[in-house]
Amino acid sequence: MTKSFGRWVLGLALAGGAAGIGLPMLVHAEQPAAEQLATVDQLKAEAFKALKAGQFDRTSELLSKASAGANDPALTKMAQWTKAFEDQRQTFVAERHKQFDKAVGDVKMLLKNHKDDYALDYAARAYLLADDKKAFRNEKWVDDLVKETIDLARQHEGKEQWLKALRLYSDLSSVDPATPEWKDKLKVATRRIRLLAMYNPEEFRKIQELESNDRETIDVFIKSTTQPTTKPTPKSTTKPADDSDDSFKTDWHQSLKDIKLSMLWDGLVDARMNYYREVSYRDLGLGGLNGLKVMATTKGLETAFPGLKSEDKKTEFVAHIDNWIEKVKNATASNEQRLVRDAITDMGRTNDDTIRLPEEVFTSEFADAAFSELDPFTSMIWPSEVPEFNKNTQGEFSGVGIQIQSDEDGSLKVVSPLEDSPGYKAGIKAGDIITRINGKNAKGIALTQAVKNITGKSGTQVTLTVRSQDGATKDYTITRQTIKVASVKGWLHRPGGGWDYFIDPQNKIGYVRLTQFTKLSTDELEHAMTEMQSAGLKGLIFDLRYNPGGLLGTATEICDKFLADGVIVSTRADRETPNLPREERAKADSDDVNDIPMVVLVNQYSASASEIMSGAMKDHHRALIVGERTFGKGSVQMLFPLAGRSAYLKLTTHHYYLPSGKCIHREENSTDWGVNPDVTVEMTPEQMRAAIDSRQDMDILRDAASTPEEKASAARKVDKKDPLAQDAQLSAGLLLLRLQLAGAKI
């Protein structure tokens, strides 16, 4: 009972006493049936209103009262479901507050022990967990810490300690997002780190290890002050047998192969003509020139480019850049194109006479910096990147058909084999470790590099050395095939293949998760919907969390499946360009699914096409949107072919607009972006990780011929990591559908 409710009862009791009426009158034992029914209906209406506002505690309270005043089994079920969810939610809230208190305590412990360099890391965690972020940021001790961290970041910058500077500017961007300076500083630090990682990976790895060791020292210190003391395990200085020097090494020559200077100029012209807003050659040129300056002044690149060892040559190169920067700054609309072209040509000659960067490096760095002036989604797709780009958007590739991830120790781990794939048929299982690829050590390999080496032309072979969970090691020589990557997943992967789509078989509530909008997604969804409908589907949870987007056409096709008519999305530029505005509309089809209640799950990692779908479903009141505000990637990119389609410029040409007219794109200083859920359910990073972990256990494709012991072990794993127990957003979505199917008007 709340305090206000308690005072209300007490007031009635006192008033009743004065009038000679006893407190038992509050029971209303002789209340007329019609009046009692009206009270129950009113309580239900208030409960469902509170539910849409995310007030689950209030909803539970009101439904419990309504249930107590009516002999209605459906209402009793509603009250039970809501109370169970509210109990779970309170556990999540308590966890969040506990994590916040710990993060604040960690900050103060670090400050007390003069470990200020890492204090804002933990303060940034606390900021994300705070119920009132503005109030937390304005606390004096937080403000003092921010000022101190600004000084520390500038010191690291001055010493060219770019990883440390990047970490602190990232923290400052988190706790002080309204200050654009931190984002600019972060961009420069990120560029310098990328240069080192690209052109001197050995040196970068050493810097990374030093930073990692510092981080580990801080983590050990924090744990030692908050957990019982245990004897630390000494680090081994001996490399394991698999850690020989034959490991894969990043080779920038391969990454930048076949890049030509002509591609750069053609890309600049396409950007000037087709970008969604007015853009000048001046701004693009300044960005590119500054990028070359950062390249020339980043220490550590001398190993890859010996010309940078000469301070005189480097000084001459930088002086020419500064001269051209001043000229281009003063460019006018009538001469900017000529000036920028002259700057590129002259700096190319100066480069040949001084630091002698290869043409592909000069071109790549100028282009990367020039197009970064526009937005994060505009970039060049160089010849070596085209096959991987096509693979990601088309939903198919040639390989062995396994999902992999990098473990904390750098091991390459199999998450799950894909159905009917060569890897699955060969016997590779979830949890296996790939120690070698074609005989080369795979420990510490970048995921992109691992994918590049495992995939290949259909019909060719790759040899994977795999260590199973029992410690046995075996070589698998596998013939690559064309693999179709399923983007639609269900609730539970059946042993041997196929999905169980029903998250609640009793109430016939289905679950589908779309990982990306590929050219195959529409057909995959059609198959899933047919299977569920034939089994009596009554409600559907459509999970778009962590979905980065994909093909616009696929997004509109899937929306059309659930909408009978109306605008799905419109796209337009902020100026007149050769690319005309478009409007996509739903049309009535015989196989439309618009008669079952739906919940769409989103979070801060739902982007682009995910936002188009969730926004259209919300604006047309076709589904309830549950979770957290989406990413805010509301821009459309088009591919402009370069050099006979050997490379492309991926350029932002339009913005998306939802049926309501809202642009979901997040600009640098936006306060409103993305799709706001109808029902907000927040999750902490730790809770999100736990939910993902439990979800992965459900996704694993297990062998249909597993022994009874293996099946029992897998079942215990799933039970132990039940996604509904770990995932508040999924549980909320299921609750809403159960209530709707039981008659709730939400």
Image (spheres, rainbow, N blue to C red):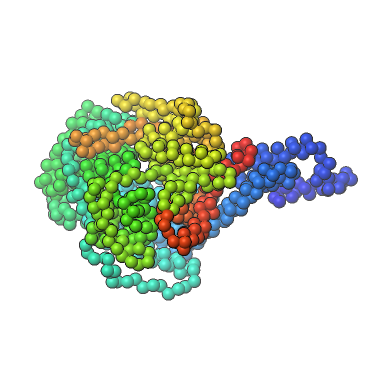
Q: Is residue 490 visible?
A: yes
Residue 6 percent across, percent down from the top left: 74, 50
The residue located at (51%, 52%) in the rendering is: 723
Q: Is residue 32 left or right of residue 505?
A: right
Image quarter of residue 161: bottom left
Q: In the current view of this chain or complex, which residue is farthest to the bottom?
A: 231
Residue 593 percent across, percent down from the top left: 50, 33
Placement of 641 over or under 117, stated as above or below: above
The residue located at (23%, 58%) in the rendering is: 438
Q: Nearer the viewer, residue 715 or 444?
A: 715
Q: Nearer the viewer, residue 40 or 200?
A: 40
Q: Is residue 508 left or right of residue 310?
A: right
Image quarter of residue 545: top left
Q: Is residue 57 visible?
A: no
Q: Nearer the viewer, residue 689 or 159?
A: 689
Q: Nearer the viewer, residue 614 or 579?
A: 614
Q: Is residue 150 left or right of residue 352?
A: right
Query: How many marks on residues?
Result: 0
Residue 574 percent across, percent down from the top left: 36, 28
Residue 117 percent across, percent down from the top left: 39, 60
Quadrant containing the C terminus is: top right
The residue located at (74%, 43%) in the rendering is: 71
Q: Is residue 682 left or right of residue 325?
A: right
Placement of 464 over or under 21, stated as above or below: below
